[in-house]
């Protein structure tokens, strides 16, 4: 049999990246090998994202490229993931050149679907919603790994498409999580990121009773991760507790970086977003983190221009940023997503005004971030070396437990190791360091 090769492109969140790793493991176990470039592949896959329209637009562009390529050579073109789940009928109608459309809930049957499409030489759509099943393993190698612990979301934030394409929350059995982490650590993994659309709502009901996220995290830190770092994302403020923060403070393997999306600081807008907390509750959590977890860094998401946002609402968010002084933020302006509750809300701000407000938010956060990074000059930081710098192959890039990027001189042999670094200066938004002997 001729060697079969695949090409896989992944768009969107870390969960997609983990699921792509699981797909690759499945493909390789069934005789497929990764191609060096798309033109070598008999199977081209796009693992898709629907969170924002810009992600879908980018994927439509790639579909157009591969549609053109199919005129010159035969190969299977497949889409998997959230966009496949959301737009299955549209994809089938608009682009018949797509041979395989696999939704979020059918990835477990992916190999069978591919083999069937090859044998029948016809397109297959498999996007029926069935109970979600986790893969046993989500890493095909390397010193960093993603481990999904739960899937789906029950929050139904009014602007978000995720619950409609990922379905309701499903928590993975804790023993499966422990076994995967134990195997990863034995194979030399140095950093593990626990994943879920709403990771701290983890709630598994088994024969031994209920296991909540703080129980899971405590057991992983105490019994399974060794000296590997453990991160988790994404957290929802309504499920963040003081007990969970205390556990992070107690265990050195749990990285002192917490990403906690605020989205907005106006309680009126938070209510319209269906976020289920007030700014005052969020503020209390962040202050407790900073008082409890040594040198913790807190990052967030900020959504500007939601329908009904007034100048006063916007000012509240700027004031919150000045008070809480986030270490970093993902900042974006509202775009309506068809299928969400907010899609029918009257859009009260022009695109120009949204961009203007967003620019002000970005400028403020950059100022805060620069000030906070500047204060780290002269300090030490244990860091995990990740890669050779693209700008200078005599330098390496590393990440601290606080999620700061650091560049320092060193040999590529250090990649995948922990190093004690001394921070000497700040260039742009990157800390510069040297190895501390």
Image: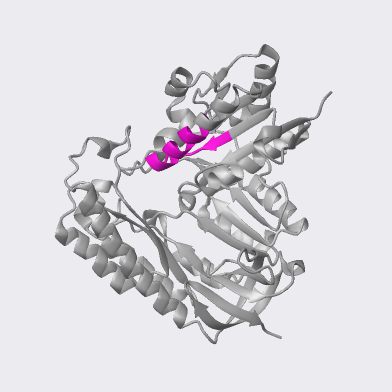
Q: Nearer the viewer, residue 397 or 390?
A: 390
Location of residue 325 in the rendering, given as x and y in whole percent from the top left corner: 35, 72
Location of residue 280 in the rendering, given as x and y in whole percent from the top left corner: 27, 64
Q: Residue furthest front?
A: 72
Dividing the picture into quarters, in which one does residue 397 lie?
bottom right
Q: Quadrant of the C terminus?
A: bottom right
Q: Nearer the viewer, residue 313 or 273?
A: 313
Residue 295 seen anywhere in this rendered image of the structure: yes
Side (left or right) of 195 relative to 138: left
Residue 54 forms part of the magenta stretch? yes
Residue 135 seen anywhere in this rendered image of the structure: no
Side (left or right) of 354 relative to 362: left
Where is 264 relative to 8, above or below?
Answer: below
Side (left or right) of 118 relative to 241: right
Location of residue 282 in the rendering, given as x and y in whole percent from the top left corner: 32, 63
Display coloring: one colour
Q: Residue furthest right?
A: 1
Residue 52 forms part of the magenta stretch? yes
Which residue is depicted at the point 52% across and 54% down? Answer: 213
Magenta region's main secondary structure? helix
Q: Quadrant of the N terminus?
A: top right
Q: Which residues are magenta?
A: 46-63
Which residue is depicted at the point 68% across and 47% down? Answer: 139
Q: Nearer the viewer, residue 11 or 136?
A: 11
Location of residue 367 in the rendering, given as x and y in whole percent from the top left corner: 35, 73
Which residue is depicted at the point 24% across and 58% down? Answer: 356
Dividing the picture into quarters, in which one does residue 406 lie?
bottom right
């Amino acid at each position: 049999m001729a060697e079969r090769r695949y090409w896989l492109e992944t768009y969107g969140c870390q969960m997609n990246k983990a699921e792509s790793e699981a797909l690759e493991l499945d493909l390789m176990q069934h005789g497929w090998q990764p191609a060096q470039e798309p033109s070598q592949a008999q199977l081209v896959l796009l693992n898709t994202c629907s969170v924002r329209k810009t992600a879908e637009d980018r994927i439509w562009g790639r579909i157009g490229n591969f549609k053109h390529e199919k005129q010159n050579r035969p190969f299977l073109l497949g889409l998997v993931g959230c966009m496949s789940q959301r737009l299955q009928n549209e994809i089938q109608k608009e682009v018949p050149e797509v041979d395989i459309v696999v939704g979020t809930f059918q990835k477990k049957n992916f190999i069978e679907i591919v083999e069937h499409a090859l044998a029948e030489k016809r397109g297959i759509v498999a996007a029926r919603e069935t109970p979600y099943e986790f893969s046993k393993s989500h890493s095909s190698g390397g010193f960093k790994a993603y481990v999904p612990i739960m899937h789906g979301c029950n929050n139904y934030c009014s602007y978000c498409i995720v619950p409609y394409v990922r379905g309701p929350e499903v928590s993975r059995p804790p023993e499966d999580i422990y076994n995967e982490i134990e195997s990863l650590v034995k194979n030399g993994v140095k950093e593990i990121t626990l994943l879920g659309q709403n990771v701290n709502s983890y709630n598994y009901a088994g024969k031994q009773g209920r296991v909540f996220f703080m129980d899971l995290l405590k057991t992983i830190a105490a019994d399974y991760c060794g000296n590997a770092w453990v991160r988790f994302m994404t957290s929802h403020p309504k499920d963040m507790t003081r007990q969970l923060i205390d556990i992070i403070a107690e265990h050195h393997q749990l990285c002192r970086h917490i990403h906690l999306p605020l989205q907005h600081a106006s309680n009126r807008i938070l209510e319209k977003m269906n976020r289920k907390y007030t700014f005052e509750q969020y503020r209390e959590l962040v202050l407790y983190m900073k008082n409890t977890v040594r040198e913790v860094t807190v990052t967030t998401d900020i959504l500007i221009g939601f329908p009904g946002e007034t100048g006063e609402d916007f000012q509240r968010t700027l004031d919150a940023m000045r008070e809480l002084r986030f270490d970093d933020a993902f900042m974006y302006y509202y775009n309506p997503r068809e299928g969400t509750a907010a899609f029918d809300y009257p859009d009260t701000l022009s695109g120009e005004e949204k961009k203007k407000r967003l620019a002000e938010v970005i400028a403020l956060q950059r100022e805060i971030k620069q000030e906070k990074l500047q204060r780290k000059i002269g300090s030490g930081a244990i860091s995990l070396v990740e890669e050779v710098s693209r700008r200078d192959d005599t330098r390496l890039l590393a990440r601290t437990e606080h999620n700061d990027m650091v560049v320092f001189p060193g040999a590529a042999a250090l990649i995948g190791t922990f190093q004690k670094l001394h921070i000497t200066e700040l260039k742009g938004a990157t800390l510069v360091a040297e190895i501390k002997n």
